[in-house]
Image (tube, rainbow, N blue to C red):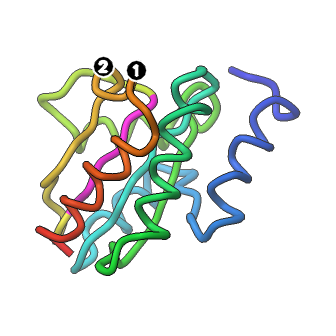
Amino acid sequence: MYPAELVLPMKAELTDNGFEELLTPQKVDETLKQEGTTLVMINSVCGCSAGTARPGVLLAVAHSEKKPDRLTTSFAGFDMAAVQQIRSHLLPYPPSSPAIALFKDGQLVHFIERHMIEGRPAQMIAANLVDAFEQYC
């Protein structure tokens, strides 16, 4: 488990921009079963999360005409039980962090795994998400 003083500023990058934290398995299930669209960002301490995933998600939300009904996040290696529960909704995909998932009416409709984030610019991640928002939101 990562220390809070390391994780909290990385969490704040999203929560200060309207993302709600999913901190328990129950909150994950309650949120994902809601009608409409839910974006889930599995946050991480890695460089690709800081340099690409978080900025890409924030760019997409800021610049898309259509947006998910709910913006949510959980932190891998810190919000352990919640992340494990999110991952149970992402099967058959293997665990990945960072990762970005879009759910519609409780069903996974779009997923960006770590290997699709690494080495790509934030603008590419944002464009991918904007396309998904246009299709599903």
Q: Nearer the viewer, residue 104 or 119?
A: 119
Q: Is residue 48 above or below residue 125?
A: above
**Would you identify the image quadrant in which residue 47 lies?**
top right
**Would you identify the image quadrant in which residue 83 lies?**
top left
Point 22% across, 80% down: residue = 35
Name the residue type under label 2: His
Tell me where residue 80 appears, x and y as whole percent.
Answer: 55, 32
Q: Nearer the viewer, residue 111 or 127?
A: 127
Point 69% across, 47% down: residue = 11
User: Does the magenta-highlighted stretch encompass residue 85?
Assistant: no
Gap between marks 2 and 1, in whole Å?
5 Å
> What's the magenta bit mostly, secondary-structure-wise?
strand
Point 11% across, 68% down: residue = 135
Residues at marks 2 and 1 touching, judged by CB atoms closer than 8 Å: yes
| Mark identifier at residue 115 | 2
The stretch in magenta equals 98-103
User: Does the magenta-highlighted stretch encompass residue 100?
Assistant: yes
Q: Is residue 119 above or below residue 39?
A: above
